[in-house]
Image (spheres, rainbow, N blue to C red):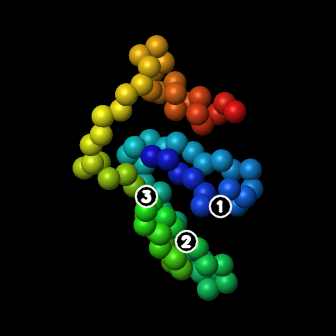
Amino acid sequence: LALTPISAFRPRRWKGAILNNKSVVKLEILENNKRPVSASADNLEVRNVKSISIQQDLSSKIVLLYDSDHSFEDRILNEQFKY
């Protein structure tokens, strides 16, 4: 599960994270009238969010191809922590 900011500049210096595919992220917006929040997933964006629960849809299946010399876990760690 990839968690990334909508804006490249906010929050500052945060480049996102790769989470376990069973993770659930819950956000409660405390002052949504003062600081409007938008959330997007794939091609759907929702504005003026008051709360949101984010989790992976495990019913969708794909085939992922990658180099057998590098494990998928290594690729995720390299993408997340090496620049």
Q: Which residue is mark 2?
A: 38
Type of amino acid at the residue the image marks with label 3: Asp
- Assess disc 1: are there few (<14), some (14-19) or many (≥20) residues with their C-alpha within 10 Å of its C-alpha: few
Distance of label 1 from label 3 (alpha carbons): 15 Å
**In the drawing, what numbered circle is on residue 42?**
3
In the drawing, what numbered circle is on residue 7?
1
Q: Find residue 43 and report its image quarter.
A: bottom left
CA separation in Å, label 3 and label 2: 13 Å
Mark 2, Cα crowd under 10 Å, few <14 / some 14-19 / many 20+, is few
Q: Residue at x 37, y 51 (%)?
A: 56
Are the residues flagged by discs 1 and 3 in contact, CB closer than 8 Å?
A: no
First of labels 1, 3 by sequence position: 1
Determine whether label 3 and label 2 are within 8 Å by CB: no
Q: Residue at x 57, y 45 (%)?
A: 17
Three-letter code, disc 2: Ser
Question: In the picture shown, does residue 74 fall above or below 43?
Answer: above
The correct choice, above or below, for 28 with respect to 66 in the image is below
Residue 11 in sight in this render:
no
Extreme residue in the top direction: 69
Task: For label 3, count other residues whose C-alpha is less than 10 Å away and answer few (under 14), some (14-19) or many (20+).
Answer: few
Residue that appears at 70% across and 61% down: 10
Secondary structure, mark 1, is: loop
Q: What secondary structure is marked by label 3?
A: loop
Q: Which mark is residue 76?
A: none
Label 2 secondary element: loop
Left or right of 44, for residue 32 = right
Measure how far apart labels 1 and 2 are at the Cα level: 11 Å
The location of residue 83, given as percent across then percent down, is 69, 33
